[in-house]
Image (cartoon, rainbow, N blue to C red):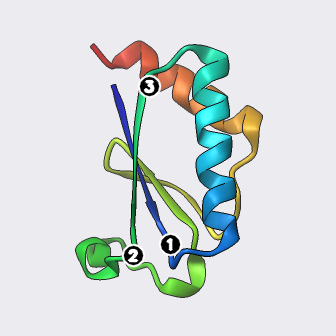
């Protein structure tokens, strides 16, 4: 399973990010767990700010910040992780 965290302040863009992640996962047949949080302190070691939201972490790595991810780019990344995830 691929673990995804969306770090955001709860804007409409946050829902757009979650929707595109679910769509990409469905299209490639990947199992994902998505969590949303606004706890920036928990991610302070990444040197990010609330101005960069939405921020997407995949399996603990910062992958996207400040925008809704491109569907094709997201599918490529999830496909790569799907192959590596037992």
Q: Give coordinates of residue 64: x percent, y percent.
A: 57, 57
Kind of element beneath mark 1 = loop
Q: Which residue is mark 1?
A: 8
Q: Are marks 1 and 3 in contact (CB under 8 Å)?
A: no
Q: Which label's residue is closer to the chain start, 2 or 1?
A: 1
Q: Which residue is mark 2?
A: 38
Residue at 50 percent across and 72 percent down: it is 8
User: From mark 3 to mark 2, how far is it between C-alphas?
Assistant: 25 Å
Which of the image's four quarters has the C terminus?
top left
Of residues 14 and 44, the one drawn nearer to the viewer in this rendering:
14
For label 3, the crowd category at 10 Å Cα-Cα, with few meaning under 14, some 14 to 19 and many 20 or more, is some
In this rendering, is residue 2 above or below 31? below
What label does residue 24 carry, if any? none
In this rendering, is residue 62 above or below 33? below
What label does residue 81 carry, if any? 3
Residue at 75 percent across and 32 percent down: it is 72
Frontmost of labels 1 and 3 is: 1
């Amino acid at each position: 399973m691929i673990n995804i965290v969306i770090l955001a302040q709860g804007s409409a863009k946050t829902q757009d990010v979650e929707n595109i992640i679910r769509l990409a996962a469905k299209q490639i047949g990947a199992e994902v767990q998505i969590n949303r949080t606004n706890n920036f302190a928990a991610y302070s070691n990444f040197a990010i700010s609330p101005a960069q939201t939405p921020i997407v972490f995949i399996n603990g790595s910062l992958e996207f910040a400040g925008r809704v991810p491109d569907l094709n780019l997201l599918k490529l990344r999830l496909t790569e992780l799907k192959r590596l995830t037992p």
